[in-house]
Image (cartoon, helix red, strand yellow):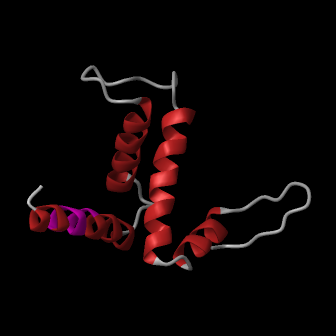
Amino acid sequence: MVKVQLTGEVEIDLEKLAECFAHLDDDQQAQFFCKVAAIADKTYVGRGTMFSHGESNADWQWSKIGEHLAECECSTDRGREMLRGIVERMDRKKEEAGR
């Protein structure tokens, strides 16, 4: 658990946010992704363009992030490898469980 005591407004830049994420254990990092998805489902309701095949606006956001990671010069090979590694392990665990 990350403990923060705040008084007033505090800006957290991406560097600090990434550092906090990196210091979480694997279970906490997985929970973080699940919480981001749940918040995004609420946040992106009625925003942006929905896919014609029924994906939520949050799914639209994920596709835009994927495009950004694939095409933007600020994206790194290591960042893409991290995401691929997560997806590959999820797929392997599903196969092992017969799902």
Q: Magenta stretch?
A: 87-92
Q: Is residue 88 above or below residue 24?
A: above
| Quadrant (top left/top right/bottom left/bottom right) for the N terminus | bottom right
Report if residue 16 lies within the magenta region.
Answer: no
Residue 5 x %, y % = 83, 68
| Quadrant (top left/top right/bottom left/bottom right) for the C terminus | bottom left
Q: Kindly identify the residue that appears in the image at 26 percent across and 62 percent down.
A: 87
Residue 90 x %, y % = 24, 64
Q: Is residue 71 above or below residue 3?
A: above
Front residue of 98 and 56: 98
Residue 76 x %, y % = 39, 68
Q: Quadrant of residue 51?
A: top left
Q: Kindly identify the residue that appears in the image at 56 percent across and 80 percent down.
A: 23
Whether residue 99 sits left or right of residue 68 in the image: it is left
Whether residue 8 sits left or right of residue 92 in the image: it is right
The outermost residue toward the front is 97
Q: Is residue 64 above or below residue 90?
A: above
Front residue of 61 and 91: 91
Q: Kindly identify the residue that appears in the image at 49 percent across and 78 percent down.
A: 25
Q: Kindly identify the residue that appears in the image at 54 percent across and 76 percent down.
A: 24
